[in-house]
Structure formats: C-alpha cells, structure tokens
Amino acid sequence: MKNEMKFGYTIVYVSSVPATLAFYKEAFGFETRFLHDSNDYGELETGATVLAFGSHTMGDMNLNGQYQKVNPNAAPLGVELAFVTDDVASAYAKAVAAGAEPINEPADKPWGQVVAYVRDKDGSLIELCSPMGA
C-alpha cells in the first residue's frame, strides 16, 4: 500500500468565519463551498486545494490555545495566501475597495510576475499575482 501525501487544506483561524467568507467573496470573488451550522468552520471554492477558515474558538479547542493569532495591528505573520489572476491591478483595486488593507501596489518582479500585497480584515497577508511564465 502506497502512502502518498498530498496538500489538502489551508485553515486560517479568524474572529468570525461568516464575516470572513463574505469578505473573501466581495474582495476576491470566491464563493462559499461550505459553512458548518456552528459558524466555527467554513470553506471557499478555490480549486484543487481548499482554503478554509476556523474560528478562534475552534483554534483554541484544536491547539489547546497554543497558537499565534493574527493581529491586524501588528506586522504580518511570515505566511501568505497567494491568489493568481491575469489582472493583478483590477484584483488589487477590488480587494482594497472591499476593505482589504493595501500593503504594496502591483509591481513588476524580475522573474516576470506582477505582484501586489494586501491584508484581510483579520490581518492575514495576501499576495495577488499573475501566473508564472505568463
């Protein structure tokens, strides 16, 4: 029997799962795939890998309160969510209009991508980028 590992989920702990799902729809166009009746867990339609959100209550339960909560008033954690789009400038403008905190406006990178950065309402760092090699 082959034990093949694959990347399945990224779960970000947030202050309000329903509000976060609504923000990601408005800012980035992602539809809700699933929201548990408890409102403590939800997933977005993001393709092959699931982007999910859990409440801080769920994080405390799963990790015995032993994790660093993202703080929108502190420097971003050393992790980012990267969303690929053909039109970074429009995606950046839409995200900022929806309430994302602007970090870096779209810029051409030496390796050929256009990249911009915003933070969501809980403080998670989000990269908006063009496809590699495009």
Image (tube, helix red, strand yellow):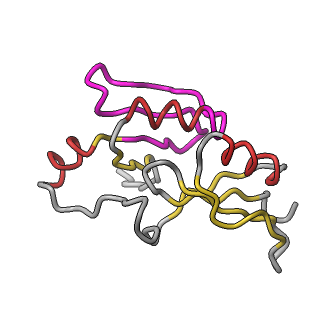
Report the residue that reaches farthest toward the top. Answer: 37
Residue 22: image x %, image y %?
52, 30
Report the residue that reaches farthest toward the bottom. Answer: 110
- Residue 107 magenta-highlighted: no
- What residue do we see at 51% from left, 34% from top? 44
Residue 33: image x %, image y %?
50, 26
- What residue do we see at 47% from left, 57% from top? 124
Report the residue that reaches farthest toward the left. Answer: 64
As drawn, 108 above or below 95? below
Dividing the picture into quarters, in which one does residue 127 lie? bottom right
- For the C terminus, the quadrant is bottom right
Residue 60: image x %, image y %?
17, 49
Q: Is residue 92 left or right of residue 86?
A: left
Dividing the picture into quarters, in which one does residue 99 lie? top right
- Report the number of discs: 0
Q: Is residue 133 left or right of residue 44?
A: right
| Residue placed most toward the observer, 91 or 129 | 91
| Residue placed most toward the observer, 117 or 7 | 117
| Residue placed most toward the observer, 114 or 106 | 106
Q: Is residue 82 left or right of residue 19?
A: right
| Residue placed most toward the observer, 119 or 73 | 73
- What residue do we see at 35% from left, 50% from top? 1
Residue 112: image x %, image y %?
85, 72
As drawn, 3 above or below 49? below
What is the magenta range? 26-53
As drawn, 44 above or below 112? above
